[in-house]
Image (cartoon, coloured by chain):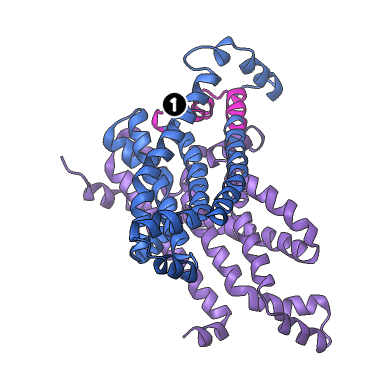
Chain colours: A purple, B blue
Amino acid sequence: MSFFNWEWVARNWTTILERTWEHIFLTAVAVAVGTLIAMGLAVVAVRRRRWYGPITSVTNILYTIPSLALFAFLVPFTGLSTLTSEIGLVGYTLLIIVRNTVAGVDGVSPGVREAADGMGFTPARRFWKAEFPLALPVIMAGIRIAAVTTVGLVTITSILGQGGLGYLILAGMRSFFWTQIIIGTVGSVILAVVIDVFLLRVERLLTPWSRRVAR
Amino acid sequence: MTNRPLIEEIILFLSDPDTWWGRASIPLRLGEHLLLSVAAVVMAAVLVIPPALWAAHRRRGVAAAAAVVNIGRAVPTFGILVVVVVWLGLGPWPALVALVALSGPPMFTNTVAGVLAVNPAVLESAWGMGMTPMMVLTRVEAPLALPVIAEGIRIAVSQVIATATLSALAAGGGLGRFIVDGFAQRDQGELLVGAVLVAALAVVAEMAFTGGQRRFTTAGISAQDGR
């Protein structure tokens, strides 16, 4: 009895690749949409401070609801669809990105803000030209955490007939087939690490000045 | 799925006596869920917190704590659950093993972080007063780290409740059963009621814990001042 069936891997190589792409697609869409929504919420929270409490409370409740329950709750309305998966996955990214974005903008030194005001920047211009770029490393840290978390959560969408590599975990569980379970789980971990490293590179590209300070 | 309206399906599920009484009833599933979650968190806390306290006291395990955070996030809980269940067999015990394994890491990292964050001046005065290493750990470092440790336990609780739900996929009990059975039998009423119950449990547990945390922190600090 062999623990890991290489032959199965060789025979099902295309399936594994397809599921990996599905996993990347589900993650990428969720993180992209989640980032857009979270940025919008964070801008509101930064401008109107009293909205910060309610925004974090609601996103925190979303974050607390177990994923299986959130997906199950959506199914009667949006069916066993990619939309159901994405609504759930996006919901889980919001709290982390909103929190980091607000923290990042708050962390910008008051001197910078004053200098921007002194140069005659409008508030919008001050935000996009000074505060946002300086907050970017903290924002990107939030996006990275959200992305890595999402990679793990995508496996659970297998109950909706998707799941990327999670499909292999579920199928392996049903047939007690170790090879599928290991490929699904280990593959998901590797994918998370690869995406994390990729986003770190993106962050370095976007903030070349922070590298000079850091090294 | 059937073509009855959703509200009718929900009423149908809720008016079934089996929903309220017997081996597959809501009270029993809730009890299973709570028992499994509490057992897992208590076991993990007993196993993990004392060694983490000691490691941090000796200024060790810092690199390990950082690694655990990063790897822990990347490992899908669903994968771990399935690995343990297929390895050890179906039923509540394998699920418990998986839950203990998953709730350990956040407690470990937070305990280490909490002890390391203790003000060095406070530590120095503790040593200066002639405290033994054990006294420094139990009377100074542990109480001061308590809020951070409690936060680690809160994270673990919330993760355990979510993963205990998933354990139903692996033929476990708990409230996740309604969701999994709802999917399998295309019973939208059961599915929706299950989802609401699980969500409510998670949110209530989180709120209860956050409330308790506040009380806990003040008690710790006032005891500190009194000494």
Q: Position of residue A155 (x, y in %)?
A: 46, 46
The reply to whether residue A83 is in sight is no
Left or right of residue B16: residue B115: left
The reply to whether residue A36 is in sight is yes
**Considering depth in this image, is A88 or B32 the residue closer to the camera?**
B32
Q: On screen, A145 above or below A161?
A: below
Residue extent of the magenta highlight: B170-196
The residue most toward the top is B17
Q: Amino acid at mark 1?
A: Gly
In reply to whether residue B185 is colored magenta, the answer given is: yes
Magenta-highlighted stretch: main secondary structure? helix
In reply to whether residue A132 is colored magenta, the answer given is: no
| Residue at position x 45%, y 49% in the image | A164
Dot 1 falls on a residue whose secondary structure is loop
Q: On screen, A74 above or below B26?
A: below
Q: Which residue is mark 1?
A: B173
Q: On screen, A9 above or below B19?
A: below
Left or right of residue B170: residue A53: right
User: Chain for mark 1?
Assistant: B
Q: Position of residue B111 (x, y in %)?
A: 43, 55
| Residue at position x 33%, y 31% in the image | B93
Q: Position of residue A152 (x, y in %)?
A: 46, 51
In which image quadrant can residue A77 be found? top right
